[in-house]
Amino acid sequence: MLTLRLRPCLTFLFLCVYLIRCSFNNNPQGTFSKNSADWNTDNLIKDLKYSRKYLNDVLIENLDFRTLVDRYPPNKGDFWYLDPPYIVAGTRNDYYIHSLGEQDHIDLRNICKVIDDSGGNFMVSYDDKPEVHELYKDYVIEAIPVKYAGQTQKREYKNELVITNYDKVAYQETLFDGG
């Protein structure tokens, strides 16, 4: 077992990475989750060292989106990625610990407008629902067909939306090169 003495913020970072790497749907005890015996510390350290080249000046927060723009007013050239709870989660009440209500989704769109008006770029991922299309009709909306690993019924493609205030770039970047 690896024991590290880290500042509280780094300890939190490692816990988040561990949760992301080992859990499915934020549930470390779920059907599709890995157990701690599957954890490879050497690979984690290698991945973190590699990604540091790309994320060295990146700020990652876990705050209410309304708090973020007050704390970090958007500037020209900033990039904001927002991954809110999906609309369907608010109706099912079984997917997230915290879901968003209708006003929250409107507030998020308004925050995107603040980012856009400031000259920053944003990307929001959402489920493909008519409400989302209506909220973000003034922006670029791209439907991405995906198959969810946790689907227990028919494994069919469903669309997720990627919403931006800019045209997409014609190439793909990778964070981890495996080397």
Image (cartoon, helix red, strand yellow):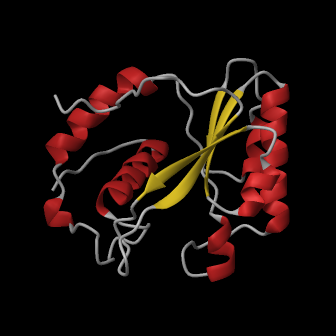
Residue 132 sits in quarter: bottom right
Residue drawn at x 38%, y 56% is: 20
Q: Is residue 30 above or below residue 156?
A: below
Q: Position of residue 64 (x, y in %)?
A: 71, 53
Tell me the quadrant of the picture where the N terminus can be found. Answer: bottom left
Residue 70 in view, yes or no? no
Which of 41/151 is in front? 151
Which of 149/58 is in front? 149
Q: Position of residue 119 (x, y in %)?
A: 78, 21
State left or right for residue 9 relative to residue 177: right
State left or right for residue 167 relative to residue 18: right
Tell me the quadrant of the picture where the C terminus can be found. Answer: top left
Residue 102 sits in quarter: bottom right
- Which residue is most to the top? 76
Q: Position of residue 156 (x, y in %)?
A: 40, 68
State left or right for residue 170 relative to residue 163: left
Residue drawn at x 68%, y 74% is: 90
Q: Position of residue 42 (x, y in %)?
A: 15, 42
